[in-house]
Image (cartoon, rainbow, N blue to C red):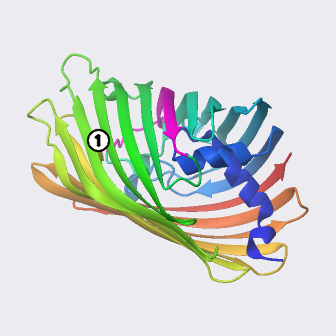
Amino acid sequence: MGFMEVTGMQKNRTKLLSAILLVIGSAGTAANAQSQLTGFTGSAEAQVSHDDNIYRTTDEFAQSDSLITLKPEAMLAGIYGKHRFQFNYSGDYAKHFDLDYADYDDHTISIRADLDHSVRFKARFVAAYIKDHQDPGTINRVQLDLAEFNTYDEIRYGAAVFYGGSDATGRVELRYKNSEVDYTNNGLDFLDNTLNEFGAKFIYRISEKTKTYLEAIYGDYDYTPPAGFVDQDNTNVIYRAGITWDFANKLTGDINAGYQERDFDNQESRGTSGLTYDGSLTWNISDYTELEVNASRQSTDSTLDQLGGITRNTLGTEIKHGITERLSINAAFNYFKDNIDLGLIRNDKRYTYETGLTFDVTRKITVSGSYKHQTRDSTLTFAEYESNIVSLSIAMAI
């Protein structure tokens, strides 16, 4: 039995989570949606963890606690004629033993319609409501008096059209996405924004499993800050070229590179421009071992007032190995670097190390344990932190 079979339940949960993601994907994704199972599928995971730095602060302010999290997921899909309709729900609920202010109840509800008009022409429509929080260790804003995690509500909807058959030499995609983000605590109203994004992509098929593409993306961010805060309205433009391939189901990849420019209306906010890239590789070393590598460079909005854009570089790798038919192990490393211009240059470097062990009790029940270490080094010492998280979980697929 191969590695993909050994971790079958994990893959099922991953597919379910991926269905919830609301990026208007590629034409290949549209085709994959048609092949997904219909009916009802679901899963639930319960986890007990201990975190020695809940708020990701320097050692002198660090607070530790244990917590219980519940993560239910459900998908209901059906076919009407040649069209596919899908409803998704996912939740992430946490209860801390001592730090009640750190509790959260996140969830995502989404609907999606894949319309198959003809062999050459397809369309997709999506909509979602998201209630989520930010891990304080993943953003560049530091709040030493933090009691609650930053929380926000988001409403998304989008549409896409795909022209060109699955075996056509050339295919065209046109996409639109709208997102409205509303921060609900910790005085972050100045980050409320609306995004209107348009994208166009041309895909050229070199062979059955190798394709190149050209893509252009234009995004307009409209912020609505209260009095006394700087308006962070900006536009984000990306031009890039890429290639995807699958060599004998052993080595698959998607790599692209291009130019990105983020321009702010307010001259006090600093824009960014230059090289952007994004790539991922998956190597099935054997039936039991899989290696994944990814890297990216992009400009994103800062969570600090009057700052503008920041440049983020990421690098990650993960290896998974099936020890037996039921037992597997994984190890992962991720690196993030943020270049932040505060008049003086601030550099943040974040490292994440993680390892875990998974045992398939049955085809539908999995028990796993993991350890995760996070570190952020910064040119601003009060932004640095270290954290260690130990977790034990049980998951069941329906």
Q: Residue 38 at what x, y percent from top left?
A: 80, 39
Foreground: 375 or 91? 91
> Residue 177, relative to residue 3: is it above or below?
above
Looking at the image, residue 295 sits to the left or right of residue 257; the answer is right
Q: Residue 171 at what x, y percent from top left?
A: 47, 48
Instruction: Kindly identify the residue that appears in the image at 48 percent across and 32 percent down.
Output: 151
Q: Amino acid at mark 1?
A: Asp
Instruction: Kindly identify the residue that appears in the image at 31 percent across and 35 percent down.
Output: 219
Q: Quadrant of the N terminus?
A: bottom right
Going by the picture, which residue comes out furthest to the right? 362
Q: Residue 100 at what x, y percent from top left?
A: 59, 36
Instruction: Kindly identify the residue that appears in the image at 40 percent across and 46 percent down.
Output: 201
Q: Quadrant of residue 312?
A: bottom left
- Which residue range is magenta in the image? 141-164
Q: Is residue 2 visible?
A: yes
Looking at the image, residue 191 sits to the left or right of residue 110; the answer is left
Looking at the image, residue 382 sits to the left or right of residue 213; the answer is left
Q: Quadrant of the C terminus?
A: top right
Q: Residue 304 at what x, y percent from top left?
A: 26, 39
Let me know if residue 162 is in the magenta part: yes
Let me know if residue 122 is in the magenta part: no
Asked which secondary structure carries label 1, the reply is: strand
> Residue 204, relative to residue 143: is it above or below?
below
Mark 1: few, some, or many residues within 10 Å (few <14, many ≥20)? Answer: some
Residue, disc 1: 301
